[in-house]
Image: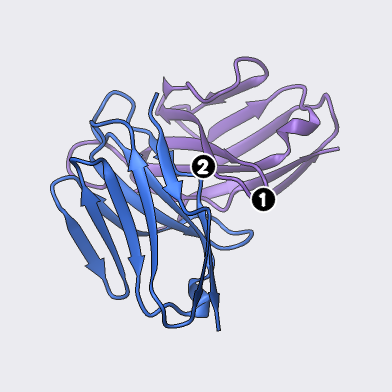
Chain colours: A blue, B purple
Amino acid sequence: GENVEQHPSTLSVQEGDSAVIKCTYSDSASNYFPWYKQELGKRPQLIIDIRSNVGEKKDQRIAVTLNKTAKHFSLHITETQPEDSAVYFCAARNYGGATNKLIFGTGTLLAVQP
Amino acid sequence: NAGVMQNPRHLVRRRGQEARLRCSPMKGHSHVYWYRQLPEEGLKFMVYLQKENIIDESGMPKERFSAEFPKEGPSILRIQQVVRGDSAAYFCASSRTTGGGGTEAFFGQGTRLTVV
């Protein structure tokens, strides 16, 4: 079945440094790749997404890259701040396909040290 | 436009009772997904529904769990004869219909089920 792997499971960086989280997916028909941020006890919130016809997308301090050939996509956060500390989940979806469901990675706990 | 609404936020049930979790999608959204999250773990897909149809229930346990999304009213996730292992946060997400954009899925606040 479909699977999304995410690494690392935990990531600690100093404030101001960059953070990179990587995901790989198994279903080559996946065409939509969102990233969610989940703070403790709260709902996952969509922070950025990318579609398969685009290789890179940027929104202020966050960016996502996609390599369709390698079935690999990454989240990049620059100039990290303490409020970036949270669990980040990647996901993949075959939008418009038979099931259309989002499959999530296992999450990365990001800790930004002040 | 209210977001995805889930209720109750917290639910305590004794072993053997039934739990009913409700999810009202965002206005204009007709796709609903249910996920289960154990403490300090990821989001596990359970079921995907459209109005009056179950599209994919491959993540749902075969027994005791059921889901529906009627023509009118919220989507319901029902757990019969709950056991302690059912204790988790259950999140609902919704997205728009296919065709014409709107691939984003937005989550509700979740229902935290505790089985005692």
What amino acid is found at the position of numbered circle 2 in the picture? Cys
Q: Residue at x 85, y 33 (%)?
A: B14
Observer able to see residue A105:
yes
**Which quadrant would residue B23 be assigned to in this image?**
top right
| Mark 2–mark 1 distance (CA, rounded to whole Å) | 12 Å
Say what secondary structure mark 2 lies in: strand
Q: Quadrant of residue A69?
A: top left
**Which quarter of the image is occupied by the N terminus of chain B?**
bottom left
> Which residue: 60% across, 21% down?
B61
> Tag 1: residue type?
Arg
**Image location of residue A34, percent across then percent down:** 34, 51
User: Relative to A109, is B66 above or below?
Assistant: above
**Residue for point 43% across, 77% down:** A80
Task: Tell me the crowding category of disc 2: few under 14, some 14 to 19, or many 20 or more residues within 10 angstroms, Cα based.
Answer: many
Q: Is residue B5 left or right of residue B15?
A: left
Label disc, if present, on residue B92 of the rendered structure: 2
Mark 2 or 1 closer to N-term?
1
Q: Work out whether residue A35 or residue A5 is closer to the camera in this orientation and state it.
A: A5
Q: Chain of mark 1?
A: B
Instruction: Give the class, few, some or many, for how many residues have Cα within 10 Å of label 1's Cα (few <14, many ≥20).
Output: some
Q: Which residue is mark 1?
A: B9
